[in-house]
Image (cartoon, rainbow, N blue to C red):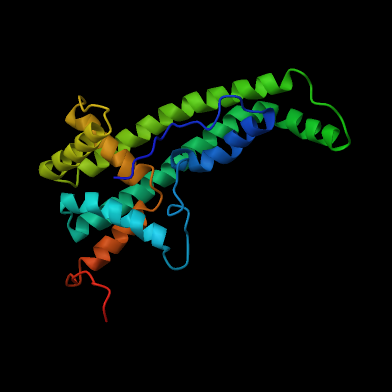
């Protein structure tokens, strides 16, 4: 699996502007902060990089032996949960920034004509950012649990155990140990393959369509 940390933070010392931008813009992509270029391709033919990434992911997903119906059901769950999550995070951002809305507009107008930023403004903006990150982390964790719970309802116990086993195997290869429970390991699989990968629903839809056609042998590159 291509595994990337959900919670990685690009730097510890954020400027006032970046703090507010994180709240305003980060809300829409809170659990996709570590997208690869393949995640961000929304239209047009798939790039070679995207297909390479998808092959890596398919290598994991194929071990679950999903049915075509499961492919479609999982894609539906992921899409629905992502929409619900985005609504919650955007509402959180709006709630935190709302008390400063008038002040921000007035300060912008002042600074457009050369005015200075008040000394305490950056500190207060940073406090909002910290609160946003803390509360967003709670939403992130709950979202993973919600998606995992929904997926367990349509997967067999063997499929859940297989996904958990893949997570354990990967963590061992990374020297991180694998002392977690089956539920924790399954949640980790769900996070990496479904929640933090923006292209998961589209890939599952491709899998569903392909399941309706006979499998073709891989090409050797010759006509």
User: Which quarter of the figure has residue 15?
Assistant: top right
Q: Decide: is 45 above or below 70.
A: below
Q: Is residue 79 left or right of residue 217?
A: right
Where is residue 163 drawn, in percent x and y? 19, 42
Q: Please identify the residue farthest to the bottom as the structure is shown.
A: 223
Q: Measuring 66% from the left and 26% from the top, which residue is drawn there?
A: 99
Q: Is residue 59 left or right of residue 83?
A: left
Q: Is residue 41 left or right of residue 4?
A: right
User: Which quarter of the figure has residue 167?
Assistant: top left
Question: In the rendered image, which quarter contains the C terminus?
Answer: bottom left
Q: Decide: is 52 above or below 109.
A: below
Q: Measuring 73% from the left and 17% from the top, which residue is drawn there?
A: 120
Where is residue 156 drawn, in percent x and y? 13, 45
Total marks shown come to: 0
Where is residue 131 drawn, in percent x and y? 54, 23
Where is residue 35 drawn, in percent x and y? 45, 46
Question: In the rendered image, which quarter contains the N terminus?
Answer: top left
**Most foreground residue, 199 or 87:** 199
Q: Measuring 79% from the left and 30% from the top, which residue is drawn there?
A: 107
Q: Please identify the residue farthest to the right as the structure is shown.
A: 113
Q: Measuring 34% from the left and 48% from the top, which residue is drawn there?
A: 78
């Amino acid at each position: 699996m291509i595994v990337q940390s959900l919670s990685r933070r690009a730097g510890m010392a954020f400027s006032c502007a970046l703090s507010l931008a994180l709240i305003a813009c980060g809300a829409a992509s809170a659990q996709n902060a570590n997208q690869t270029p393949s995640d961000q391709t929304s239209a047009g033919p798939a790039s070679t990089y995207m297909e390479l990434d998808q092959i890596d992911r398919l290598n994991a997903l194929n071990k679950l032996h999903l049915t075509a119906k499961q492919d479609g059901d999982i894609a539906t769950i992921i899409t629905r949960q992502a929409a619900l999550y985005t609504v919650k995070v955007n509402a959180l951002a709006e709630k935190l920034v709302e008390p400063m809305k008038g002040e921000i507009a007035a300060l912008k107008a002042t600074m457009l004509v050369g005015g200075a930023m008040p000394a305490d403004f950056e500190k207060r903006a940073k406090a909002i950012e910290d609160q946003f990150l803390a509360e967003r982390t709670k939403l992130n964790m709950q979202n993973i649990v919600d998606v995992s719970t929904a997926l367990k309802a349509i997967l067999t116990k063997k499929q859940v155990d297989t996904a958990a086993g893949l997570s354990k195997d990967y963590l061992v290869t990374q020297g991180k140990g694998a002392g977690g429970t089956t539920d924790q390991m399954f949640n980790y699989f769900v996070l990496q393959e479904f929640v933090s990968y923006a292209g998961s629903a589209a890939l599952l839809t491709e899998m569903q369509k392909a399941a309706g056609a006979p499998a073709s042998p891989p090409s050797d590159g010759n006509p």
